[in-house]
C-alpha cells in the first residue's frame, strides 16, 4: 500500500514539474504574441517583471469582464423594468 502511494506521489511530482515547465513556456509565448513594446525581453527580464506583465494583463481582462457584466446586468434590469411597466 505504501509503495503504491509513493509511486503515485512520485508520478504526481513529475507531472507537476513538467506542467510547471509547460506553463513557463506558454507564458513566454503569450508575452511574445502580445508584443508589448518596452516590456518584452523574456531572456533578460526577471521573473518578477514578467509576473507584473502577466498580472497587469490578467487585471485588465478581469476588469473588462466585470465592466461588461455590469453593463449587461444594467441593460437586463432596464429591459425587465420596462416590461413590467407595460403590464
Image: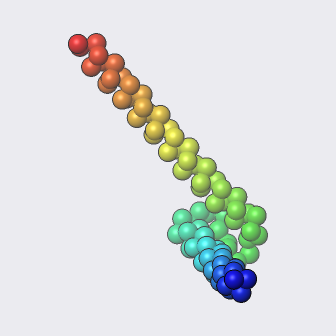
Q: Position of residue 20 (x, y in %)?
A: 66, 75
Q: How many marks?
A: 0
Please say if 57 is above or below 74. Answer: below
Snapshot quadrant of residue 72: top left
Position of 31 relative to 10 (above/below): above
Q: Quadrant of the N terminus?
A: bottom right
Residue 32 in sight = no
Residue 39 pos. (x, y %): 66, 64
Q: Residue at x 23, y 13 (%)?
A: 87
Q: Is residue 61 left or right of residue 82?
A: right
Image-quadrant location for residue 51: bottom right
User: Which of 19/37 is in front?
Assistant: 19
Q: Quadrant of residue 36?
A: bottom right
Q: Residue at x 27, y 19 (%)?
A: 83
Question: 17 and 65: which one is in front?
Answer: 17
Q: Where 4 sits versus 39, above or below?
A: below
Question: Where is residue 77 drawn, in percent x and y?
Answer: 38, 25
Question: Going by the picture, which residue comes out furthest to the front?
Answer: 1
Viewer can see residue 19: yes
As drawn, the residue found furthest toward the left would be 87
Above-or-below relation of 34 to 21 = above
For image coordinates 29% across by 16% down, the residue present is: 84
Instruction: Compare residues 74 and 56 and report the one nearer the observer.
Output: 74
- Horizontally, residue 44 falls left or right of residue 35, namely right
Amino acid at each position: 500500500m505504501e509503495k503504491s502511494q509513493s509511486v503515485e506521489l512520485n508520478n504526481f511530482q513529475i507531472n507537476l514539474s513538467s506542467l510547471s515547465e509547460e506553463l513557463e513556456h506558454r507564458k513566454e509565448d503569450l508575452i511574445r504574441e502580445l508584443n508589448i513594446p518596452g516590456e518584452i525581453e523574456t531572456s533578460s527580464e526577471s521573473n518578477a517583471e514578467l509576473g507584473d506583465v502577466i498580472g497587469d494583463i490578467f487585471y485588465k481582462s478581469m476588469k473588462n469582464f466585470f465592466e461588461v457584466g455590469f453593463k449587461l446586468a444594467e441593460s437586463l434590469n432596464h429591459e425587465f423594468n420596462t416590461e413590467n411597466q407595460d403590464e
